Amino acid sequence: MATVDRSTMASLADIASLADGILCDMLFPAPPAEIEEELLARRRTGYSYTSLTLAQDNEAAPSQVYSALAKMRHALSLHPDDFILVDSVDDIREAKRTGKIGVGFHFQGSEAVGRDLANVGAYYKLGVRWMLMAYNFQNNVGTGCIEAQKNDGGLSAFGRDLVAEMNRGGMLVGCSHSGYRTAMGAW
């Protein structure tokens, strides 16, 4: 794979209206060494915060997700001069103030919860701040946008319980990639 010389790239901080901005971007998972280099490149470009996708509905068994979270948190914690694991908005501000990059996590879909609402609070404590209801296809919470073209059954009873638990714990409910009725049921 060709390497890009990022030293010649303009920084987002060069744009006056973005100089004080806190930015968020999403990345799909990769081996920690590759993620670390990607995150450092984003920091050099002016990012203060990024959220890493650590699960998608098609590969989201809770045991695998917990393992991925543990490995990623460990890898990033080995570089305290570069990264801040984000638990609050103040952590993002601290990352910006100190020239580091804040890192949080999210899920593309809700299959990582399985059928156990207790996972929501556990994931939140590990830095997961938001998850989508469904990622393109039907899951046990609702209908994804691709399947919704044929039949959008909306949010399931378990989905309504999940939204309530996410709201209770402070986790953001994401509705992109979900069908219209599923998204409106989450609202």
Image: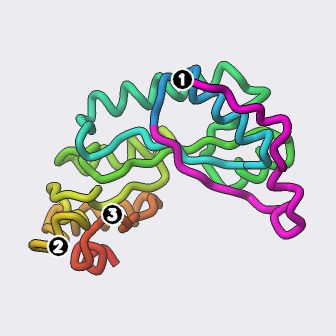
Viewer-side residue, 9 vs 83: 9
Magenta span includes 21: yes
Residue pictured at 84% horizontal, 70% vertical: 17
Q: Main secondary structure of the magenta part?
A: loop
Residue that carries the numbered disc 1 in the rendered image:
32
Magenta span includes 65: no
48 lies above or below 184: above
From the viewer's perspective, is 173 left or right of 45? Answer: left
Q: Which mark is residue 82?
A: none
Residue that carries the numbered disc 2 in the rendered image:
149
From the viewer's perspective, is 92 left or right of 153? Answer: right
Could you tell me the amino acid type at mark 2? Answer: Gln
Residue segment shown in magenta = 1-28
Name the quadrant containing residue 84: top right
28 lies above or below 178: above
Residue pictured at 28% horizontal, 43% vertical: 112
Could you tell me the amino acid type at mark 3? Answer: His
Name the quadrant containing residue 141: bottom left
Split into 4 quadrants, where in the image is the C terminus? bottom left
- Please tell me whether mark 1 sits on a helix, a strand or a loop: helix
Residue that carries the numbered disc 3 in the rendered image:
177
Q: Are marks 3 and 1 in contact (CB under 8 Å)?
A: no
151 lies above or below 105: below
The mark nearer the N terminus, 3 or 1, is 1
- Please tell me whether mark 2 sits on a helix, a strand or a loop: loop
Give me the C-alpha separation between circle 1 and circle 2. 37 Å
